[in-house]
Image (tube, rainbow, N blue to C red):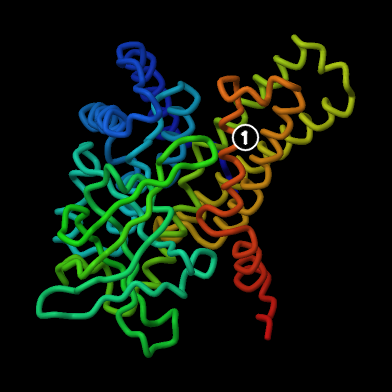
Amino acid sequence: MDLSDTPEEEEFRARLKEWLAKVLPTLPPKPSPDDWPARRAYDLGWQRTLYDAGYGEVHWDASPATRLIYLEETERAGAPYVGAGFVGLLHAGPTVAAEGTPEQRARWLPPILRGEEVWCQGFSEPDAGSDLASLRTRAWRDGDAYVVSGSKIWTSHAEVADWCELLVRTDPTAVKHRGITWLAMPMSAPGVTIRPLRTLAGSAEFAEVFLDEVRVPVANRVGAENDGWRVTMVTLSFERGTAFVGEVVACRRVLGELARTARENGRWDDPVLRRRLGRLNAEFRALWRLTQWNVSEAERTGGVPGVGGSVFKLRYSHARQELYDAAADVLGPRSLDLDGPWTLDRLSSLSYTIAAGTSQIQRNIVAERILGLPKGP
């Protein structure tokens, strides 16, 4: 498989790099990490800048290869992260683009691309995290609306979101994977209560969401009723297959900074540390090649990443944790300083073997869907 850029992709890469070099120095300073309304405004402002420059639709209207180039170059240039736009741009939006009706695509995609609306993810529940299909949030039909009651947890950016990609159980008598429906719920609807959750790192980008007979129009259903698990697999394939692409580039950059720091503070003299950093360098180079392969496969099969995303997610989650453990080794006692470099990244890395499907879930997917191994009893 040829993983090199085509002439058209080379032209896009060069044009994007030139534009980033011009616009990034003109951006305002980033707001405080704890000020989510300000962060929302900053993140949406950046998305609007991208949209006005012709790069707003790269997340789903461009080819997977072009999308990969975009994520690679924006991360290398130090461009703002999607931030509050993460759910809308990287998996809810692509899901609507792939599975939504023309009316749904016309309603929800342009505001995401123009930096006007934020989405959050209402998947996990207190008793349905790793076993997502065990969710209990109920929705029943009442005329042209679903009435939804239940609760969600670890809902990303709920406190500043306009919409929620919501999984509900619409047939409690069905086999658990077959009674689920994917809805787009307005967060301003009566009956929605949001309680922010503070993480180990001190931030509050997650929340509990409580739903008390919230009415969601049937027109907001993406896919057929009780076919939500299949639609969810599309969402998760984007989340696992392409949403972390920019972070691989970021990890490679951090690895280079670690090597420079080790040379400056004398830790480079330790051969064990040098071998560790060398192995991580090989690991992230391999992950980048795997990303390119996954993107090429997605392009060949219609734009939706396949189960190869689980291979990537499984290894990347652990490699990221190993990278920031190595950072602690390089920094020594300074690694305990919350205001120091990489400390908060190390704390957040602990969640990566859980977020977007635990490592155990990814191993099951790889075993059953790629290797063809039988399911357990």
Q: Nearer the viewer, residue 247 or 39?
A: 39
Q: Is 359 positioned to the left or the right of 166 in the image?
A: right
Most distant residue in the bottom direction: 173
**Which residue is pictured at 27% across the width and 33% down the height?**
37
**Which residue is pictured at 36% across the width and 21% down the height?**
30
Image location of residue 81, percent across then percent down? 41, 32
Q: Disc 1 marks which residue?
A: 346
Classify the position of the C terminus by image quarter. bottom right
Q: Is 342 positioned to the left or the right of 14 in the image?
A: right
Q: Is 189 positioned to the left or the right of 255 in the image?
A: left
SS under mark 1: helix
Q: Nearer the viewer, residue 273 or 48?
A: 273
Q: Residues within 10 Å of mark 1 (few under 14, many from 20)?
A: many
Q: Is residue 247 visible?
A: yes
Q: Is residue 255 above or below residue 364?
A: above
Q: Nearer the viewer, residue 259 or 136?
A: 136
Image location of residue 325, percent across then percent down? 71, 34
Res 71 quadrant in image: top left
Residue type, mark 1 in image? Arg
